[in-house]
Image (cartoon, grey):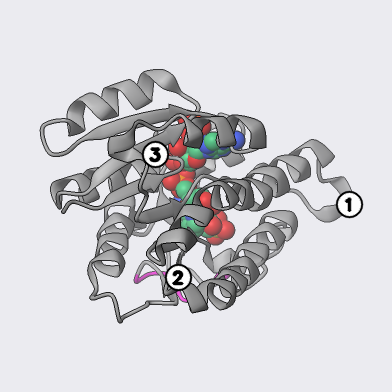
Amino acid sequence: MRKTALITGATSGIGRATAFELAKHDINLILCGRRQERLDTISQALEKYTNVHSLNFDVRDKNAIHEAIESLPSDFSTIDILVNNAGNAHGKDPIQTGSTDDWDAMMDINVKGLLYVSRAVIPKMVERNVGHIINIGSVAGKEVYPNGNVYCASKHAVDAINQGMRMDLNQHGIRVGAVNPGLVQTEFSEVRFKGDTQLASTVYEGFKALQAEDIAKIIHFVVSMPTHVNISDLTVFPTAQASSTILNRN
Ligand code: NDP
Ligand code: 8X3
């Protein structure tokens, strides 16, 4: 029987690429995001591969998440795989001048949003003693870099939540693991720099960044392992990157 995966942040970047990768491997999909037009376009493109249902909610809105999960049609209501991917950096300022609105956005989306979606999905996994959760962390959850302050804090929180989830869900046979990418060329930097596409493009100049499809293939690899194998924590850099602060630009 086909598995069903719910992917948050499926309208762009890593989430969208993961939707295509899992669809091509016969996994039913629940695609989540706030931009309905994109959800519609992506769903249409994937319908030739698999069954797709989309849910429009902001991960900051716990009531909307709960209602959306409760509203799932019976064909989609058994979620086998949860990809907690929605998130972004907002701003890249030193702590003394950082925007408290940016800080709220990062903590509310990257940390609390991930928790709210997980809280809505996990109980049914626990009832069935079946499930696989992939938390998209970051190298920023393993190291801190200058001006990364609160984004790094949010991803360190994801790292801790990933470990805690694995412990609590261990007795239920639910697999939990994180995929922690280095620099991936997506809309991430456009969001971080508030639509300044020129500044955003400089982030990926002079080296070959990871592509969203690279991470999607890794996520498929993780979920396709036999059920006795749990990839708990995986960090992936572009070859040109050795750490958050060491990047070989030519
Ligand atoms: P993108 O900006 O391309 O995609 C972000 C996705 O998150 C979009 O689909 C967006 O959908 C969704 N999202 C953002 N805010 C919300 C919200 N409040 N409610 C619901 N959905 C939301 O970035 P990436 O694909 O690069 O990022 C995906 C994940 O990967 C993030 O968690 C990021 O931290 C992580 N990551 C990225 C790296 C990179 O270098 N790009 C490296 C390491 C980790 P919509 O706007 O439609 O709601
Ligand atoms: C995204 C990668 O280096 O911009 O998590 O923090 S980085």
Q: Name the residue under label 2.
A: 177
Which quadrant of the rendered structure holds the N terminus?
bottom left
- Residue 41 position in % (x across, y down): 28, 22
Residue 205 visible in this rendered orientation of the protein? no
Q: Which residue is drawn at 26% across and 28% down?
A: 43
Question: What amino acid is labelled 1 in the image?
Answer: Gln
Q: Mark 3 points at which residue?
A: 10
Residue 136 is left or right of residue 161, and the answer is left
Query: Assess mark 3: CB under 8 A from ligand 1?
Result: yes
Q: In which quarter of the image is residue 77?
A: top left
Q: Name the residue under label 1.
A: 96
Q: Nearer the viewer, mark 2 or mark 3?
A: 2
Magenta stretch bounds: 239-245
Question: What amino acid is labelled 2 in the image?
Answer: Gly
Q: Which residue is drawn at 28% across and 75% down?
A: 227
Q: Principal SS element in the magenta part?
A: loop
